[in-house]
Amino acid sequence: MKLAYAPLLCMLLASTLFLAACSRNEPNENKTTLSTSKTPAISEPCDLITKQEAETLLGEPLKEGEKTQEPAVGMKLCMYNPVDDASTAFLQITLTHKTFMKPDGVPPESIFNTIREAMSEDRTDLQDLGDGAFIATGGIYILSDGYYITIGAGNIDRAEIRERLKTAAAVALDNLKTLR
């Protein structure tokens, strides 16, 4: 992952970890099992936007998606970086679902709504994308049928990045419908 994008990833991860920590009602040091709910059809953020689709969105060849996850908050991440090390393009997709987290985890809907409220002054709400969507610092945030999805692609102050995020969100939601 490019060092320049580490703050973005840290911000998203810190927000999610903060929400998880604040929502606990009792100590859970010994709990490590994931939810026993039915596993969703989509289990990886790289399924929401494939490498080929990401290359089309960014207009250049990309490396295979780097996958990471944070089970404590039910978040999985896929990071597409360019083949050309001089390029600053990237596409980062996170996927949060209750089946990826511990039983006492914060529901994806609560995470989405808390972040949406925290970014109320600087966000742009979007229509016709899932159950709710907005663009704010870090990228586009989407809630759709129990899935919380974020997509980052660069500086949201740039019009072409905002359009790229909206297109990426539409691709991700189409794939979510198809694969479910």
Image (spheres, grey):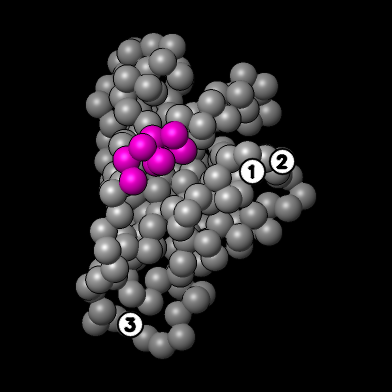
> Which residue is at the front of the view, 135 or 49?
49
Mark-to-mark CA distance, 3 and 1? 33 Å
Q: Which mark is residue 28?
A: 3
Q: Residue at x 45, y 30 (%)?
A: 171
Q: Is residue 110 left or right of residue 54?
A: right
Mark-to-mark CA distance, 2 and 1? 5 Å
**Residue 177 covered by magenta stretch:** yes
Amino acid type indicated by mark 1: Phe
> Which residue is at the front of the view, 65 or 83?
65
Q: Which residue is identified by label 1?
A: 134
**Label 1 near label 3: C-beta < 8 Å?**
no
Q: Which residue is identified by label 2?
A: 124
Amino acid type indicated by mark 2: Thr
x and y percentages locating residue 135 in the rendered image: 63, 39
Label count reads 3
> Which residue is at the front of the view, 13 or 7?
13
Q: Residue at x 33, y 75 (%)?
A: 103
Amino acid type indicated by mark 3: Asn
x and y percentages locating residue 81 in the rendered image: 35, 25
SS for dot 3: loop
Q: Residue at x 62, y 19 (%)?
A: 160
Q: Which of marks 3 and 2 precedes in the sequence? A: 3
Q: Which mark is residue 111?
A: none
Relative to residue 84, is residue 79 depicted above or below?
below
Mark-to-mark CA distance, 2 and 3? 37 Å
Q: Say which of marks 3 and 1 sits in front.
A: 1
SS for dot 1: strand
Which stretch did the figure color magenta? 172-180
Relative to residue 61, is residue 81 depicted above or below?
below
